[in-house]
Image: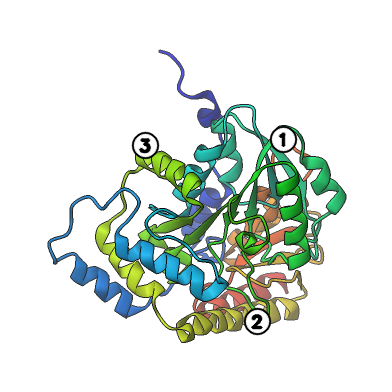
Amino acid sequence: MKTPNQYLASLPTTIFTIMSQLAMKHGAINLGQGFPDTEGPQDIIQVAEEALRDGRNQYAPLTGLPELREAVAASNRRFYGLEVDPATEVVVTSGATEALAACLMAVVEPGDEVVVIEPLYDTYLPALKLLGAVPRCVRLAPPHWSVPEAELRAAFGPKTKAIMLNSPMNPSGKVFVREELELIAELVREHDAYAICDEVYEHLTFHVKHLPLMTLPGMRERCMRIGSAGKSFSLTGWKVGYVTAPAALASVVAKAHQVMVFATAPNLQRAVAYGLNKDDSYYQGLSTQMKTQRDLLRDGLHRLGFETLPADGSYFIVADISRHAAGRNDVEFARWLVEHAGVATIPVSAFYDPQGDAAPQNLIRFAFCKKPEIMQEALKRLEKALS
């Protein structure tokens, strides 16, 4: 029998699956996977429920229901001053992961180089390699994850087609500052490239404001900006994403979306449109809640002797295990925590190119998008195991 796709067949079971399986086996509290353990706003869920019964359950339009595209455009205007045509510059997708794939398919061809920033979300490299693109990794160094200008400049070249930018960043919690974005914008313009901007945590920042690359000079026509209802409304299972892009790019993104998915559940689209139109107090409340949960976990980890790295956005905080590792690397220590403390985390080395230079071995990622009482219990378990 002929072999299946060799690249996909060769991919190992992800550390996320492994840690989740270990968590179930040992009855561990799962602070590894990045999804909330509470439901999203009940009024949004009620809109989705009612929309199932209004006789509009057939295929939605390819680019999304008009009311959701209009809500995405209005959100761009309200939060960032971006004027977007909902008819031609918004594409609704089945989650941000599909949006990432569709945006890559829209601009990348075999042999093109794409700049990616490590540590990186785990689907980036497989998606690039399946398209025949060549990733050019630029590594940010802990603890502050500042952009190394010389290395970033060196990663761009004649074959550069795009850069993938994740801000707020998973797993580091970094929010890129204006100076870093201006450098990226300069290089994108200089090399006539595109930017695929993964901004799913845009409303989850603490003390700092998220600034889309698309708002910078010369970037409006080069950026594809990706948002996620799952992260903005704590409804990750809905898998509703949206791409904002100039019309010329959006039309190609829509063709990729057509090939892969075609349409997203119409009742969920109508509910997300309702959610995007919530007033500012909702978004401020979400950010405040997540900051409180971040602080609870961060302060607890400090009491236990862990050093934590700055986390200005997202669901995640990274901790240095050096004081407790006893010679174990991050993967070994994460397994030990599941088995001996009953707490699951993710080793940060999983967010690096396995074909690249050795990744840091002293960092693990905790998710703080969990109920406070659950995180308190996790801290008690950690204290007992480490004492």
Marked residue nearer the N-terminal end (2 or 1): 2
Depth check: 336 or 102 in front? 102
Task: For marks 1 and 3, give the CA distance.
Answer: 30 Å
Amino acid, disc 1: Gln
Task: For marks 3 and 2, give the CA distance.
Answer: 43 Å
Amino acid, disc 3: Val
Residue carrying label 2: 295
Residue 1 is situated, as x and y percent measured from the top left of the image, at 40, 13
Q: Is residue 291 left or right of residue 38?
A: right
The total of numbered circles placed on residues is 3
Depth check: 297 or 77 in front? 77
Residue 151 is situated, as x and y percent measured from the top left of the image, at 84, 47
- The quarter of the displayed image where residue 387 is located: bottom right
- Can residue 49 be seen? yes
Residue carrying label 3: 259
Residue 355 numbered tag: 1
Q: Is residue 192 left or right of residue 5?
A: right
Task: Give the colouring mode of the picture.
Answer: rainbow
Closer to viewer: mark 3 or mark 2 = 3
Amino acid, disc 2: Asp
Name the secondary structure under disc 3. Answer: helix
Q: Is residue 223 left or right of residue 117?
A: left
- The residue at 43%/64% (across/down) is 230
